[in-house]
Each structure stands twice: as structure tokens, then as C-alpha cells.
Image (spheres, rainbow, N blue to C red):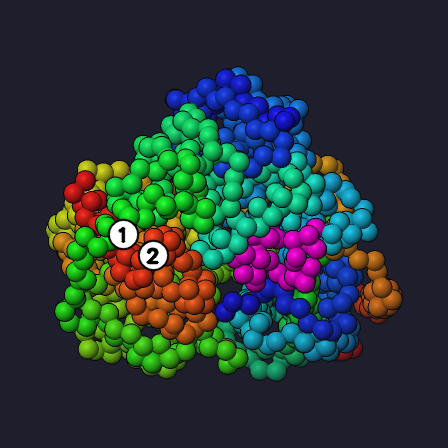
Amino acid sequence: MAKILSYTKKETWIDALTGVTKLAFFLAWSIVSMITYDTRVLGVMFILSLIIFKISKIEVSQVTSVFKFILFFLILNVLFIFIFSPYQGCSIYHSKTVLFPIAGGYAMTSEQLFYELNIVLKYFTVAPAVLMFILTTHPSEFAASLNRLKIGYTVDYSVSLALRYIPDVQRDYTTIKHAQEARGIEMSKKASLFKRTKRMAAIIFPLIFTSMDRIDVVSTAMELRGFGKKKKRTWYSARPLSRNDYLVLLFLLVFCVGALVITFSNGSRFYNPFH
Amino acid sequence: MEPIIEFKDFSFKYRAQKEPTLKDINLTINRGEKVLIIGPSGSGKSTLSQCLNGLIPHTYPGKIKGRLTVNGKNPKKAGIFGMSETVGTVLQDTDGQFIGLTVAEDIAFALENDCVEQSKMIQRVYDVADELDIRKLLDHRPNELSGGQKQRVSLAGVMVDDVDILLFDEPLANLDPATGKSTIALIDEIHKTTNKTIIIIEHRLEDVLYKDVDRVVMINDGRITADMTSDELLSSDLLEKAGIREPLYLSACKLAGVKITPDMHPSHIETFDVSGVEDNVQKWFHETAYQPENNSHETILSVKHLSYSYDQAHRVLDDISFDIKEGEMLSIVGRNGAGKSTLSSLICGFMPVDEGEILLEGEDITPLSIRERGEKIGFVMQNSNHMISKSMIFDEVALGLEVRGVPEDEIKERVNETLKICGLYPFRNWPISALSFGQKKRMTIASILVLNPKILILDEPTAGQDFRHYTEIMEFLKMLNRDHHVTIIMITHDMHLMLEYTHRAIVLADGHLLADETPARVLTDEKLTEAAYLKRTSLYDLSLKCHIDDASAFVERFIAEDERERDHG
């Protein structure tokens, strides 16, 4: 429970990359996979994602709950696309191969199936990249790397402090939940959803108040140590780019350009196997 | 002697308040001095410290009258950043003030903000880390350190800036007794080696006086009521008037009819001259009758061979067994991480038991849910804010009954009755935000008590409280225990609490049960106190100095006598 979505040090070359490289990778990877619907490109990216995920040695237990969450939205997304525009695939690929009729105006077509497969692939290429970025980037390096992208350092710090406090808030949540359960406020699934939502307030309010206390203390501490004194600041943990960083960045550049060229070579963002 | 801090007819009134919090302060502190500022809660001692580092008037606005100069600067004009170059503040809550994710980054924080070049920064961090002996910890996360190491890291983060004045805001508040002692020693060492001006704000006089201070300034009700050496202060009745606890060995001497004078050097037990005291103390010891209380009630809670581990690697609790009798008031002590919280979490059912049993009135409660156990065993958290979810007092106390579907009439009756017991009935329709700390604590206790638990477990019930509030809370708990027959278990660092209000102490260290003894025995046992990060009581040293062989009997007699005196005013 304690270590969901928080950084843990691992001895891998991915871990050793600088925050800037990881951020660049994360952004480029997400953008490319959002733009392209080219199944070949997405397929390659998906396989690469899996390989990278494997190399980064992230423990599966750290991401299962988040992964389930993503999966839930994925299924929802795919279902809704089918319900609201069952022939989206046909209009994209300019053909209609009915596999079997369902009911009313609905029928399953291979084009639609293929189109939705692309959507699923997109999810599966982006998700590992996001998770890997969060789990292998030390939050303070994250702040430093945002700063390199010329984002003001107060913003960088608020982001990295937020990341840093995730475990603390999780711990507070558990403590408060236990104390309230002992008083009889049950969170188990026996209670109705309405009751549970109402009782959730018994945890959320104390949690907000304790978090505000925390913020108060840390902002005073930061101010007393000169945070915000100057327009710029330096970073203790800033690291120069290493050979691996340059290699990754170079690969990223080549890959992205290549992916986009392949994607747009036939005049649309879609790869069409039906012609 | 060159003055570094000068208050001249200084007053301060917070914007939201009618009365000034500081009134006519005239105080001069010289360069290189080590000054202790004491005062009860709400006396204005923290306000005074916030005037020095510029938080007043910049973060907490208000009206200043008179003049304040700190190292030639006026904090009002210099601002918080300007003052941070002169005054280094070590805040009370070490956990909350860590900003960096590693020790090194946290130390470097002030330098980063000052745009110091990376290579210089690293050198400077290494130097300070060497000075404070934490070089090995530079790559660790601050949160995984022990209490004493955390103190060193937060001190390093302040000293890295090469400030002239070090300001410690209640440095002992969250520390176990042994760590507190070494912190005071560390501050003393820094004072001696760097010759910085040191200001310590505390209300635990005996613990701070473990090492010499040049002067003690006492603040009460916004005014300076004493500015003298510690020997002089301890020989006066000013402490009693302000409601600050004097060192225990001096209380004992006073009970024995001795008058304390400055030439006895009462500041430390080591230097305390007992030649004129010894006879009185011995006489008092032999004349005072003492009968140990005998609790012959039934066993209410029985813990048998309890073990627990978060991971396979090491056990947080290892084969713990003890019995608690009905109507007992006992303490569970040990340093942070010794397993105290794990033990209480297992008893309350917050975590499943790995091995062993917990019997409540002879019945195994391990299969019961948190909620079911909550009706028999109430748990009161250290931080009241963790428990409060309503805005009105009545609603908060009624919550536990409401969710159990108790009829409305009965809820009203039971809540009112509980509020009467807790002395909160007149405030029943007040918003919670209007309550003081002590009242809030009583309200959270009321919200548990309303469920009629047989046992009440309290986590650090008096943490951070001054003597008056401490006494208020503890006397309330004693009343609950005596008049309402609630068995009370307290998890604590506070040795005074353990000595004065509990009859038994369960001592944990590294998951093992080290002792199950009377507090007087525990705190007079050198080996035991060391292993459990406690501190031997100064009464023990006094009894040795006065050639009384049975130190624990002496301590027991003193506590019993002291209690009698308190009960009869």
C-alpha cells in the first residue's frame, strides 16, 4: 500500500538517466502515440514500451492498482466509441466488412474492430511510459528538469513537493480511516454507496485539515531558508547529460521523426489494411 | 560584550487580536550568549522568537511599537529573507521542515535559493555534514532517519548559511528522552565550538538545563518576568507562579522542607550541593510511610505471545506477552520505532495479528473487526485534528452513536452525559474551532467515551503541552480512571507522565518487551533506561547523593507524596 506511485531507487541505466531525458522521453512518446493511428508504429511502440518497462525493473505490485484504474477507463472508452459511433472505423477506412449484425442499426465490422484495436494500443503505449516516468524519476530531479524547460521554479517545486507528499498523505489517510472505523464509521462494502460517500467525508475533512497544517509548516520552513529570494536558483542535484542521455535523446529524435514520416506517408494518420 | 539583539520598549499586537501579545519588552542579548527563553503556552515566547526571524510582521501581520535590532538590522525592514542570513531557525517539527528528498539536498536548500554554484554548494554541504557528523547520511531520505539524526540534519540545513544566531523553537517537543538529552548536548557543543549566539525556546526546564545556559529569560502573559541565571531562577518562586515545572530533584528537596538558594548550584543535579540538604531528605525518606497500591481486580486485557512483521526480514514485535487488570492506568514506553504504535494498532485491530492472541475479558478478539473492537477499546490519536470531522461539538461526539443507529433520544442523553463528565457540557453548541488545545483533546476523548469502552488507549495525550495543560489533561484522565472505572493505557515519551500518573510501565525496545515494572523501578535502572532510550530520573541521582540505597523506594515515596499534595491542593 505504502509505495504506490512513489519513487524507489533502482540500479538500472534507465534510473541513472537525468530527469530532463526522462521528461523528454515521456513528452515525445505521449505526443507521438497520440498523433499516430498507424498500427505498425503503435505496435512497435507498444513492444518497445514493454521492453523499457522490463528493463526499468518496476515491480508489478507498484502499478497494479493504477493499471486497473487505467484499464477501467480503457474499457469504458472503447465501449462508448462503439455505442455512439459504431461505424467510425468504416468511414475512416472507406470500406465496410460486416462480421455479424447485432441489433437495430448496430453491426460489428472488421474496420470498427481494427479502429478500436488502435485505441487500445495507444493506451498501452502511453501508460507504461507515464508510469515509468513517475516511478523512476526522483521528485527533486523532476523539479530540476522542469526548470530546464524554463518553467518557473516555484511551479517546479510545487509539483515536486506534491509528488513527495503522496506517501505522507497516504499514511495520514490510513491513520484517519482506522480511527474513524474504530468509532464505527464503516467503509466496508456492506454499506450503501450513498452512506459510504457520506462517511467518506469523515475521512476527507480531517485529511484536508492535516494536509493544510503540513503545508503551513513546510511553507514557513521554506521561507525561513530563503525560498523565493531570487528570480533564479541553482540545483544541488542538477546533473550534466551523460553519454547515455545523448544516446537516448538521439534515438528519440530519430524514432519520432521516423514514426511521423511513416504515419503521414499515405496522407492520413491511419494505416489502412483494407485496401 | 557587544549586544546582538536589542528589544527597546517593544510591543506587538497581532492584527486579529485586541490585546498585545508582547508588552514593553526590554531585552538585550549579547553576541555569543546562550539564552533560554521559557514561559507557559500562550505566554508570548514563540511570538518573541518570530519577531527575531522576521515571520513577524511579514507572515503574521500586526502592529509593532518600540524598537528591535537584530545584528544591526530591523527585521521589519529586512524581511524574512534578509533575516534568514542572520538568524537560523530550527523549527519544532523536524519532519515537517524537511524540503529536500535527500539529506544532502535538504542541507543545500538555502544555498540553492541563494544561487550558489553547484561545486561550491557541494563543498559547503560536505563541510557542514562533517561538522555535525552526518556525512554518512547524505544520500538517505530525511524521513528514514532517527529522531536525533533528524535534529542534526535540520541543524545542518540552517548552519550551512553561516548565520550569527541560532534559534531553536522547542527542540525537545517530539523527541524521546534520551535523544532530547543528546540534542541539548549537541547544541551546547555547537555553542562552544562556533561561539554563535544561541536562543532556545522551551518549557521543559529540567531537560534544557542538562547543559549550562548563560541566562534564563522568563515570559509570562506577554511580559518578561525574569531575566537571571538559572541558579537564581530555581531559587525563586517565579517558576511556580508562571506554572512551569521545576526540576524533580528540587521538588523533592522542597517536600523535605529544604529552601533552595543560588549557592547550592541547583541548575544541574551533578553540581547541586546537597551538604545542607542530605539530612532533611534522609529524614523525610524514613518518616514518610508508603504503601504500594494493590490492584486485585480481574484481568481485562491479556496479550499472549504476540508477534508481527511488515516484511519477512525483521519482526516489529517479537513474542510480547502481558496482562492488564481492570481499572489500571499504565504506560507503554520506548523510542520511536520500538513497536509501541504497532502494538496498539494490533490491539485495536487496525492490522491483523501474525502470531499470538489478544484476549479481552477472557475472549479472543482477534477475529473481531475494527468497529466491533471499537465498542470495547477506544483509541485516541495524538493529533486531535486526525479525528475531527464535524464542525459542532455535539455532532462530533454524537457521530459514533449515529452511525450505529442509536435512537435520537438516547444519543442526546448519552452525549450530554459524556459532555458533563468531560466538562464540556456548557460548550455543547459551540463550534469546535473555538476550543483550546486541551478542550479539543477532551472532546476527542468524549467522542470515544460516549461508546462506553472498557479500555481507553491514548497516543501521547500530552505531547507538546506545558505543565498547566499537561496537569489539566492528566487529572481529567485520572478522574475518568478513578470515578468511571475506565482502564487507561498511554503510549508516551514523557517520563513525568509515566512516573506521576501510571502505576506500571511496559517497556519496549526493538520489538521486544524489556520490562513490565513500576515506573519508579524502570527510571532508576541504568541499563534499562539506556536500552529503551529513556532518561534516568534525577530523583535517582538525588537519592544517591543523599546516600539513600533504595532509589526506587525513594522515587515511589516522592510520587505518592506529591500526588497527595496535588489532590489536597
Q: Main secondary structure of the magenta part?
A: helix
Q: Position of residue A169 (x, y in %)?
A: 50, 57
Choose between A129 and B165: the one closer to the eye. B165
Name the chain letter of the residue that bears numbered label 1.
B
Residue where numbered disc 2 is placed: B547
* Residue name at image x 61 percent, y 76 percent: A59
Name the one closer to the observer, B220 or A180.
B220
Q: Quadrant of residue B103?
A: bottom right
Against B163, residue A58 (above or below) is below
Q: Which residue is mark 1?
A: B282
Around disc 2, counting alpha carbons within 10 Å, would you say few (fewer than 14), some (14 to 19), or many (20 or more)? Answer: some
Chain of the residue that carries numbered disc 2 in the rendered image: B
**In the displayed structure, would residue B178 be above or below residue B359?**
above
Q: Are marks 1 and 2 in contact (CB under 8 Å)?
A: yes
What residue is at 54 percent from the left and 42 percent from the top? B168
User: Does dot 2 land on a helix, a strand or a loop?
Assistant: loop
Image x and y of residue B236, in percent: 36, 32
Residue type marked 2: His
Of the numbered discs 1 and 2, the one sitting upstream in the chain is 1
Q: Nearer the viewer, residue A209 or A26?
A: A209
Quarter of the rendering containing residue B517? bottom left
Would you place residue B527 above or below residue B205 in this image? below
Query: Along the horizontal axis of the image, is B422 left or right of B20?
Result: left
Type of residue at label 1? Gln
Start-end of magenta stretch: B128-155
x 38%, y 65%: residue = B525
Q: Secondary structure at mark 1?
A: helix
